[in-house]
Image (cartoon, rainbow, N blue to C red):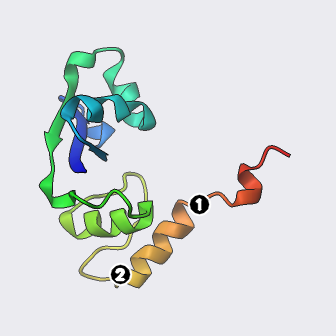
Amino acid sequence: MKAYLLSVKDEDDAGQAVVFANTAKEAKKQVFAHDSLVEALEGGWIDLRVHRSKRYDGMEKLSAAELALHQWPDGWQWFDMDFPYPDESTDAEFIEWYNDTFPTPTKKENSHE
């Protein structure tokens, strides 16, 4: 699949998201999975930007932590968080920080019992 970057025009604080789709139109539909982008749009869908990001092509099967590990040395930042810097930390330290900061729900937490 192709990688796309979603962003909102003139709303840098909303950040960006990497999504995977076959077309830009399909990529746009994935904005609803990213609250900060939806909030920044405020219904102004004309401001939604979609750009190809060949750098991340073929990475759709990576976990969120593994994808973030690729974004990290590219300069991606996690706003309002104290995250490790690429030139001062190892990949293992980054993954540990990521998993501690964004824990993956366990099966028990996802169950409706």
Nearer to me, 111 or 76: 111
The picture places residue 108, in percent across and down from the top left corner, at 77, 57
Mark earlier in primary sequence (2, 1): 2
What amino acid is labelled 1 in the image?
Thr
Reply above or below: 94 against 37. Answer: below
Nearer to me, 81 or 94: 94
Residue 17 visible in the picture: no
Dot 1 falls on a residue whose secondary structure is loop
Q: Which residue is drawn at 24% across and 32% down?
A: 11
Nearer to me, 44 or 81: 44
User: Residue 104 — which label?
Assistant: 1
The picture places residue 76, in percent across and down from the top left corner, at 26, 58
Dot 2 falls on a residue whose secondary structure is helix
The picture places residue 5, in percent across and down from the top left corner, at 22, 44
Q: Which residue lies furthest to the right in this view?
A: 113
What amino acid is labelled 2 in the image?
Asp
Residue 57 in the figure: left or right of residue 109: left
Q: Residue at x 34, y 63 (%)?
A: 67
**Marks 2, 1: nearer the viewer:** 1
Residue 56 in the figure: left or right of residue 39: left
Residue 95 in the figure: left or right of residue 42: right
Q: Residue at x 22, y 58 (%)?
A: 56
User: Residue 33 — which label?
Assistant: none
Q: Do the residues labelled 2 and 1 touch (CB within 8 Å)?
A: no
The picture places residue 34, in percent across and down from the top left corner, at 41, 38
- Quarter of image, res 26: top left
Q: Mark 2 points at which residue?
A: 91
Q: How crowded is mark 2: few (under 14 residues within 10 Å), some or many (20 or more)?
A: some
Q: Residue at x 34, y 85 (%)?
A: 90
Residue 59 visible in the picture: yes
| Measured Cα–Cα span from mark 2 to mark 1 | 19 Å
